[in-house]
Image: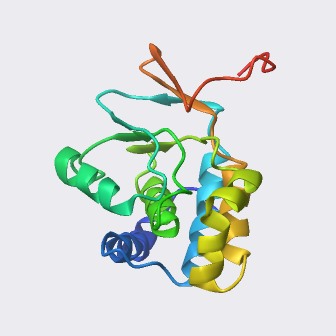
Amino acid sequence: MNARLGLEEYPTYDSMIETLLKHQFLPEADVLRLCDRARALISEESNVTNVRSPVTVVGDIHGQFHDMMEMFKMGGYAPDTNYLFLGDYVDRGYYSVETVTLVVALKVRFPDRVTIIRGNHESRQITQVYGFYDECMRKYGHAGIWKAFTDLFDFMPLSACIENQIFCPHGGVSPSIDTL
Protein backbone atom coordinates (compact mmCIF):
# COMPACT_ATOMS: atom_id res chain seq x y z
CA MET A 1 0.00 0.00 0.00
CA ASN A 2 1.31 3.42 -0.96
CA ALA A 3 1.31 5.60 2.15
CA ARG A 4 0.15 8.74 0.39
CA LEU A 5 -3.29 8.96 -1.16
CA GLY A 6 -3.70 8.81 -4.90
CA LEU A 7 -5.83 11.48 -6.57
CA GLU A 8 -8.63 8.97 -7.07
CA GLU A 9 -8.78 8.44 -3.27
CA TYR A 10 -9.26 12.12 -2.38
CA PRO A 11 -13.09 12.04 -2.68
CA THR A 12 -13.33 9.09 -0.25
CA TYR A 13 -11.24 10.81 2.41
CA ASP A 14 -12.89 14.19 1.78
CA SER A 15 -16.21 12.46 2.44
CA MET A 16 -14.87 10.99 5.69
CA ILE A 17 -13.73 14.44 6.82
CA GLU A 18 -17.08 15.97 5.85
CA THR A 19 -18.90 13.35 7.93
CA LEU A 20 -16.60 13.93 10.90
CA LEU A 21 -16.98 17.71 10.70
CA LYS A 22 -20.74 17.14 11.15
CA HIS A 23 -19.87 15.46 14.46
CA GLN A 24 -20.76 11.98 13.27
CA PHE A 25 -18.53 8.98 13.70
CA LEU A 26 -17.49 6.79 10.80
CA PRO A 27 -18.45 3.18 10.09
CA GLU A 28 -16.01 0.69 11.54
CA ALA A 29 -14.60 -0.35 8.14
CA ASP A 30 -13.73 3.28 7.33
CA VAL A 31 -11.97 3.79 10.68
CA LEU A 32 -9.93 0.62 10.23
CA ARG A 33 -8.93 1.65 6.70
CA LEU A 34 -8.05 5.14 7.97
CA CYS A 35 -5.86 3.75 10.77
CA ASP A 36 -4.08 1.43 8.34
CA ARG A 37 -3.37 4.28 5.94
CA ALA A 38 -2.24 6.59 8.75
CA ARG A 39 0.08 3.92 10.14
CA ALA A 40 1.70 3.47 6.71
CA LEU A 41 2.09 7.23 6.37
CA ILE A 42 3.51 8.07 9.77
CA SER A 43 5.77 5.02 9.88
CA GLU A 44 7.77 6.80 7.18
CA GLU A 45 8.26 9.86 9.42
CA SER A 46 11.10 10.51 11.82
CA ASN A 47 10.66 10.48 15.61
CA VAL A 48 11.34 14.21 15.36
CA THR A 49 9.18 15.51 12.52
CA ASN A 50 10.28 18.68 10.73
CA VAL A 51 7.51 21.29 10.37
CA ARG A 52 7.47 24.37 8.18
CA SER A 53 6.29 27.75 9.40
CA PRO A 54 3.74 29.28 9.55
CA VAL A 55 1.96 26.64 11.63
CA THR A 56 -0.76 26.66 14.25
CA VAL A 57 0.30 24.60 17.25
CA VAL A 58 -2.51 22.78 19.09
CA GLY A 59 -2.11 21.28 22.55
CA ASP A 60 -4.20 18.73 24.42
CA ILE A 61 -7.66 18.36 22.88
CA HIS A 62 -8.75 15.45 25.11
CA GLY A 63 -11.91 14.60 23.19
CA GLN A 64 -13.24 18.16 23.29
CA PHE A 65 -14.64 18.03 19.77
CA HIS A 66 -16.57 21.31 20.01
CA ASP A 67 -13.48 23.17 21.22
CA MET A 68 -11.55 21.78 18.26
CA MET A 69 -14.29 22.96 15.88
CA GLU A 70 -14.10 26.44 17.45
CA MET A 71 -10.35 26.41 16.95
CA PHE A 72 -10.82 25.55 13.26
CA LYS A 73 -13.35 28.39 12.91
CA MET A 74 -10.86 30.86 14.37
CA GLY A 75 -7.66 29.51 12.82
CA GLY A 76 -8.91 28.10 9.53
CA TYR A 77 -9.29 24.58 8.22
CA ALA A 78 -6.62 22.39 6.69
CA PRO A 79 -5.28 22.65 4.05
CA ASP A 80 -5.58 26.45 4.24
CA THR A 81 -3.84 26.41 7.63
CA ASN A 82 -0.89 24.26 8.67
CA TYR A 83 -1.40 22.42 11.96
CA LEU A 84 0.89 20.76 14.47
CA PHE A 85 -1.10 18.69 16.98
CA LEU A 86 0.91 17.91 20.11
CA GLY A 87 -0.96 14.80 21.23
CA ASP A 88 -3.57 13.94 23.87
CA TYR A 89 -6.40 13.65 21.36
CA VAL A 90 -8.38 11.23 23.54
CA ASP A 91 -9.67 10.71 27.09
CA ARG A 92 -11.51 12.96 29.51
CA GLY A 93 -13.87 14.52 26.92
CA TYR A 94 -17.06 12.94 25.61
CA TYR A 95 -16.03 12.84 21.95
CA SER A 96 -12.61 11.22 21.83
CA VAL A 97 -13.59 8.89 18.98
CA GLU A 98 -14.75 11.74 16.75
CA THR A 99 -11.82 13.96 17.74
CA VAL A 100 -9.00 11.49 17.11
CA THR A 101 -10.65 10.18 13.95
CA LEU A 102 -10.88 13.69 12.51
CA VAL A 103 -7.28 14.56 13.40
CA VAL A 104 -6.05 11.32 11.82
CA ALA A 105 -8.23 11.83 8.72
CA LEU A 106 -6.80 15.34 8.29
CA LYS A 107 -3.28 13.93 8.60
CA VAL A 108 -3.94 11.28 5.95
CA ARG A 109 -5.67 13.69 3.57
CA PHE A 110 -3.23 16.60 4.02
CA PRO A 111 0.07 15.00 5.13
CA ASP A 112 2.18 18.04 4.29
CA ARG A 113 -0.14 20.44 6.13
CA VAL A 114 -1.04 18.45 9.26
CA THR A 115 1.53 17.04 11.68
CA ILE A 116 0.58 14.82 14.61
CA ILE A 117 2.75 13.61 17.48
CA ARG A 118 2.11 11.24 20.35
CA GLY A 119 1.03 12.46 23.77
CA ASN A 120 1.03 10.52 27.02
CA HIS A 121 -2.67 9.65 26.55
CA GLU A 122 -1.89 7.84 23.30
CA SER A 123 -1.20 4.60 25.12
CA ARG A 124 -3.13 1.45 25.95
CA GLN A 125 -2.78 1.82 29.71
CA ILE A 126 -3.88 5.45 29.97
CA THR A 127 -6.82 5.07 27.57
CA GLN A 128 -8.18 2.18 29.61
CA VAL A 129 -8.28 4.37 32.72
CA TYR A 130 -9.38 7.76 31.36
CA GLY A 131 -12.23 6.87 29.03
CA PHE A 132 -11.22 6.25 25.42
CA TYR A 133 -11.51 2.47 25.74
CA ASP A 134 -14.99 2.74 27.30
CA GLU A 135 -16.11 5.24 24.66
CA CYS A 136 -15.01 2.91 21.84
CA MET A 137 -16.91 0.06 23.50
CA ARG A 138 -20.05 2.23 23.80
CA LYS A 139 -19.96 3.57 20.25
CA TYR A 140 -18.77 0.47 18.36
CA GLY A 141 -19.76 -2.37 20.71
CA HIS A 142 -16.31 -3.97 20.93
CA ALA A 143 -12.65 -3.07 21.37
CA GLY A 144 -11.61 -3.33 17.70
CA ILE A 145 -11.57 0.42 17.07
CA TRP A 146 -9.69 1.04 20.32
CA LYS A 147 -7.11 -1.55 19.27
CA ALA A 148 -6.74 -0.01 15.80
CA PHE A 149 -6.07 3.43 17.30
CA THR A 150 -3.74 2.22 20.04
CA ASP A 151 -1.78 0.25 17.44
CA LEU A 152 -1.56 3.47 15.41
CA PHE A 153 -0.41 5.44 18.47
CA ASP A 154 2.68 3.20 18.65
CA PHE A 155 3.85 4.62 15.31
CA MET A 156 3.32 8.33 16.06
CA PRO A 157 6.38 10.58 16.15
CA LEU A 158 7.49 11.67 19.61
CA SER A 159 8.14 15.32 18.80
CA ALA A 160 8.33 17.95 16.10
CA CYS A 161 10.74 20.74 15.30
CA ILE A 162 9.50 23.93 13.64
CA GLU A 163 11.97 25.31 11.08
CA ASN A 164 14.84 23.51 12.89
CA GLN A 165 14.50 26.09 15.68
CA ILE A 166 11.55 25.30 17.96
CA PHE A 167 11.53 21.84 19.57
CA CYS A 168 7.98 20.63 20.27
CA PRO A 169 7.55 17.49 22.36
CA HIS A 170 4.20 16.72 23.97
CA GLY A 171 5.26 17.40 27.52
CA GLY A 172 8.89 16.61 27.94
CA VAL A 173 11.34 13.91 27.07
CA SER A 174 12.30 11.06 29.36
CA PRO A 175 15.80 11.38 30.86
CA SER A 176 16.34 7.75 29.82
CA ILE A 177 16.17 8.64 26.10
CA ASP A 178 19.71 8.95 24.77
CA THR A 179 18.89 9.97 21.19
CA LEU A 180 15.93 11.03 19.09
Q: Quadrant of the N terminus?
A: bottom right
Query: Number of marks in the image?
Result: 0
Residue 90 position (above or below residue 136):
above
Residue 43 position (above or below residue 139):
above
Q: How is the image coloured?
A: rainbow
Query: In the image, residue 176 lies at what x, y percent?
Result: 81, 19
Tell me, yes or no, if residue 109 can be seen here. Answer: yes
The answer to whether residue 45 is left or right of residue 82 is right
For image coordinates 23% across by 48% down, the residue present is: 80
Tell me, yes or no, if residue 32 can be seen here. Answer: no
Query: In the image, residue 7 lies at what x, y percent?
Result: 41, 66
Given residues 70 and 19, the one toward you in this image is: 70
State the image quarter where residue 127 is shown. bottom right
The answer to whether residue 129 is left or right of residue 97 is right
For image coordinates 37% across by 69% down, the residue present is: 17
Which residue is situated farthest in the top direction here? 165
Given residues 84 and 8, the one toward you in this image is: 84
For image coordinates 37% across by 41% down, the residue present is: 83
Residue 109 position (above or below residue 19):
above
Query: In the image, residue 100 lies at what x, y percent?
Result: 51, 60
Given residues 159 and 141, the one toward you in this image is: 141
Q: Quadrant of the C terminus?
A: top right
For image coordinates 42% across by 72% down, the residue present is: 8
Query: In the image, residue 162 lies at what x, y percent?
Result: 43, 23
